[in-house]
Amino acid sequence: MDATAQSTRNTRERILRSAETLFAESGFNATSLRHITQAANVNLASVNYHFGTKKELLKELIRERVSSVNEQRLERLRQCRCRENGKPSQLRPIVEAYVVPMVQAKYGRMKRESSSPELICHIQTEMPAFMEEMHREFFQPVQEKFLEAIREAVPEVDERELFWRFHFAIVLILGAVGQRSRLMLLSRGQCDGEDIEETARKLIEFICAGITAPAIPACQS
């Protein structure tokens, strides 16, 4: 890659990183393009050149961050199926394939923390219609593949019940990786929310237990 192409790529990544941090901290509406250009140390023309509008910048940010996680999830799921030689996979490896890439993405390959979980939570609250569009485009296709695999692994769980449990699992993952300081405060330092491996292990254990828990009959009035 020549110097000009590398510089262009670096500028683009600085804009994305700055936008990710600011959107996660302050939300979409409270973050202006001027805030982003100042944080990234670029001019407005650079943002317009690479992304156009602020909403297009947000969409590209979600696409890039989510695509990497989704690719890892699907590859792990493919490996699960290969190991089982076409038979239904066990539940735990499937849940692990869904959980681990998100937990790892939170901290990043280079030990720099990602704000993607906080960003998604923030935008879901502030821009529900936009996030519904993003969900259909980036999240739902992968989630449906995992639901299919989980359904095969635990056929005894009612399908409607499985939708509820998988939905709760998704919310749990986002909350667990996005609010680690709460765990430190709640446990008075006994539990380390910065421990990636333990966070992933505990999430996997809890989600597996929730998915396979006996159904509780509805209360009769």
Image: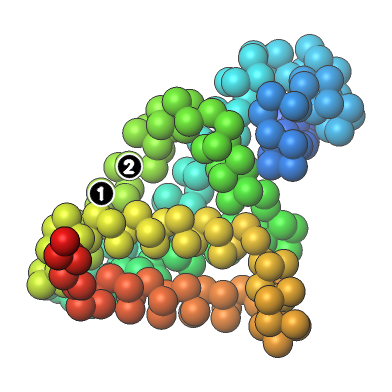
Task: Spot the residue most to the front.
Answer: 221
SS type, badge 1: helix
4 sits left or right of 88 in the view = right
Please report the residue visible at 24 percent of the width from the left and 76 percent of the height from the top: 212
- In space, the residues marked 1 and 2 are separated at their CA atoms by 6 Å
Q: Position of residue 18 (x, y in %)?
A: 77, 37
82 sits left or right of 47 in the view = left
Query: Which label number is shown at residue 144?
Result: 1
**Residue type at the position of mark 1:** Glu
Please report the residue visible at 79 percent of the width from the left and 12 percent of the height from the top: 45
Picture quadrant where residue 62 is located = top right
The quadrant in which the C terminus is found is: bottom left
| Residue situated in front as seen by the camera: 14 or 98 | 98
Neighbourhood count class around disc 1 (C-alpha, 10 Å): few under 14, some 14–19, many 20 upward = few
| Residue situated in front as seen by the camera: 3 or 74 | 74
Picture quadrant where residue 139 is located = top left
Q: Position of residue 10 (x, y in %)?
A: 76, 35
The reply to whether residue 41 is visible in this rendering is yes
State yes or no: discs 1 and 2 in contact (Cβ < 8 Å).
Answer: yes
Please report the residue visible at 77 percent of the width from the left and 20 percent of the height from the top: 33
**Residue type at the position of mark 2:** Gln
SS type, badge 2: helix
The quadrant in which the N terminus is found is: top right
Please report the residue visible at 68 percent of the width from the left and 34 percent of the height from the top: 27
33 sits left or right of 141 in the view = right
Q: Position of residue 200 (x, y in %)?
A: 51, 74
Task: Spot the residue most to the bottom.
Answer: 190
> Where is 121 relative to 205, above or below?
above
Query: Which label number is shown at residue 113?
Result: none
| Residue wearing tag 2 | 140
> Where is 87 relative to 98, above or below?
below
